[in-house]
Image: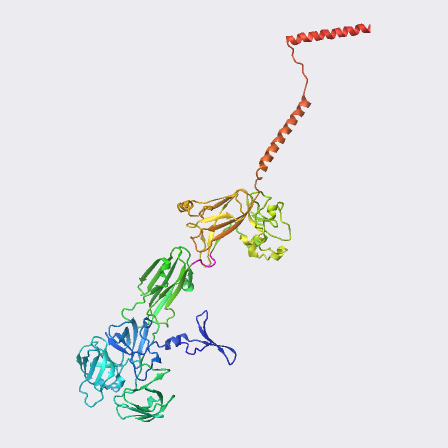
Amino acid sequence: MSQILQGEVPGTAVLVDNTGQWYQVRVNSSTAGIQTEVVDITGGIQSADTSFARPLVPQFLSAETIVFHEHKQLQHPWETAEDGLTSGFSQLHVGQKLQLSTSGSALITRVKTEHRRENYTAWARAHVFKPFQFETLSTSPAQAYSVEVACESDGKSLLTLKNVGGSMGWLFSDVGKSLVVATGNNHLLTEVVTMTTARADPGMTCKEVTITAGMWHLYDFNSYREYATVYDQALTISSTTATVTTGYFEFASYHIGLVLQVSTGSATITGITSVTQVTLLVPGGSLDGSYPAGEWSLQDVRGKQARRKWNITEDECRHIMNVKEAFLTNNLRYLDVREDVRLAANATIAAHAPEVPGERALLVVTFGDPMLFQKIETDASWDRAGYHHLTLHIVHDLLKQGHSSVTVYLPGASMLCPLTSHTVTLRCQCPPNKHMHYVYHNQFTEDEFLHGHPVDKDGRDLLQTLEVNYRPPSSMGVGIPLSNNIYNADPSQDRPNDFYQVSQETGQYKQCLGKSTRAECGCTKQMKLSSLEKFSDCIDRAHRMLYPAELSVRLQVVRPGTETIELDQPYVVVIEEVNSRSDYVPDSVVTPSLARLRADRKLNHTLMYYSPRKLSVLMTGARLYHFRVSALEGFSYCNLVAEFIIYVDRPPIAYPSEYIMRGGISIMIGMILFLVYLYYLHTHHTPFTRKSTSQHAHLNREQLAEQRRNMSDTDSDED
């Protein structure tokens, strides 16, 4: 990244827009403004060099397969600790291309960060795209002779040239180069002892052998390119002039711009005076002195380090990776209790890519914290077109909250490919905005609910408008409300049914607290449409049902971006009336698990548990019911709560009024019937003579005789 953002300075920020374009943003002090610059990610990746300052020893297993053995860093007199030459092979190099500056390239297919041989730290296996070129005789004249390999007791090898005569043999520029033979008995030159003798570190077990000329070659995979091909030529620096003794090495015009490295510093060649003398630009103090062969170097320096003979860069894109759209667009997934997720991807080798024997586009998956999941199923397969298909089925473990990354990637894919990996973060917690929702049997639009008058097929109202400052009845009676909730609140009007002190002491405003009129309460449309207790001040209409009212409770779990599901087993719910009414009877299917739950003594048995399946409520009272249904904890990380309001209308007369009225009416009807009967006797009665018995006849005769005597006495007096 540092190579991509080469212009990064303090006060610089890197921004990425929604299209993936990178911008480098910095404050421009001269104009007191913001300066932005597009970051060329592709160009930066192509130019990024991940090589390291350690020599490599090549070992050819075949014409197409090569192994690079990484040797430890060779310390030279002009190298210092602050050069930072400490990197080496790593797994990040897999899929990258190693190139030699002269000729040759190979694709790194495998890296091992350990080595069996002393002085070697790692090795890498690669597939050869373009053959590597060994050194020419003019650069390394020792290749013209046979070499004898002798093994020393300290594990090193001694390389002795045969029949050199007076010709040039080993040069100090050969240090760091590799002697390579077909048998694999390769050596890295570490020291030139004489013109015919050099010491080396064998890449494998040392074998004493004599190798004829033409059967071995020198390959230059040194950490830097050495231009000073000398053996015994000393260098003398005087002020800004450098002179080399006459010999095999000669200065040339292409040396202008190169850097002379000595133990006391460095200088840049600015001109060629002769084949033995050059002019210098010395940036620091004086470098005057004489330096024998092996203690001075001529290098091509870029920045602070010498330009390397080889480099490692990103290979061209040779893979195609596809991710399912649902996997690609949603990089953050939430998993609730017992929820699962399925992820799918596939990959193949591009048709235009050079063929690498045995290479397949194998997808790899890694987890940040696999212990969060109860089950991880991986289904991998290959099709006839060469595509590797990978499907993941991940099931969240019970009651384990946390988060884990899931990454699917192609280990050998180039960063220049549009897609080489994809990561999804799985959070085992309550998904945002997941909630439980009650579904009313009659659905209305917002305008219908707030302002309309919908009716059923019989012309009966489906909505009930609540009176101002309405409060539901209590167990003490319809006219004695005890609820703290006030519906359709208006502080400017009186509260109905506030005849008793217990009613006056209850009932509190929420949205209208401290307000003088309803207009000041700030009730919004959503508050009026809500069924939540906290918005009771604003609720002025409710769904209406006729007595007797039995309601089937239908609950849904709503989660944005996913399909709405019906609340069912294994969920367990608790239902309550928020206004403390008790004149209702819930009922549901009693499953075996619910029965065991109800029988568990460890649970709170002041609550009754119900199954959402076929949940119903029988309301035995009248007027407003405000129910709250809550899912039992442990079935979800979310607090699943739903509220709904039902207004029961046209109830029978409340007890004992009904019985009193029936008794009174019965008595009144009985009295009316009795009075009618008396009136009837009075108006329709006819006198009649009773029949006499013998006793009665005797009495009647005496009375008749008495009457006659009285009559005769009356007549005599008149005479």
Q: Main SS of the magenta segment? A: loop
Whether residue 335 is visible: yes
Instruction: Tell me: 612 left or right of 102.
Output: right
The percent position of residue 411, horizontal first and vertical second, equals 33, 68
Residue drawn at x 39%, y 58% as measured from the top left: 341
Q: Quadrant of residue 695?
A: top right
Q: Residue furthest right?
A: 719
- Residues shaded magenta: 429-434
Residue drawn at x 41%, y 74% as measured from the top left: 41
Query: In the depicted view, which residue is nearer to us: 102 or 569?
Result: 569
Tag count? 0
- Position of 618 relative to 129 (above/below): above
Residue 621 is one of the magenta-drawn residues: no
Q: Quadrant of residue 250?
A: bottom left
Query: In the depicted view, which residue is nearer to us: 265 or 573?
Result: 265
Instruction: Tell me: 606 left or right of 165.
Output: right
Query: In the depicted view, which residue is nearer to us: 322 or 142?
Result: 142
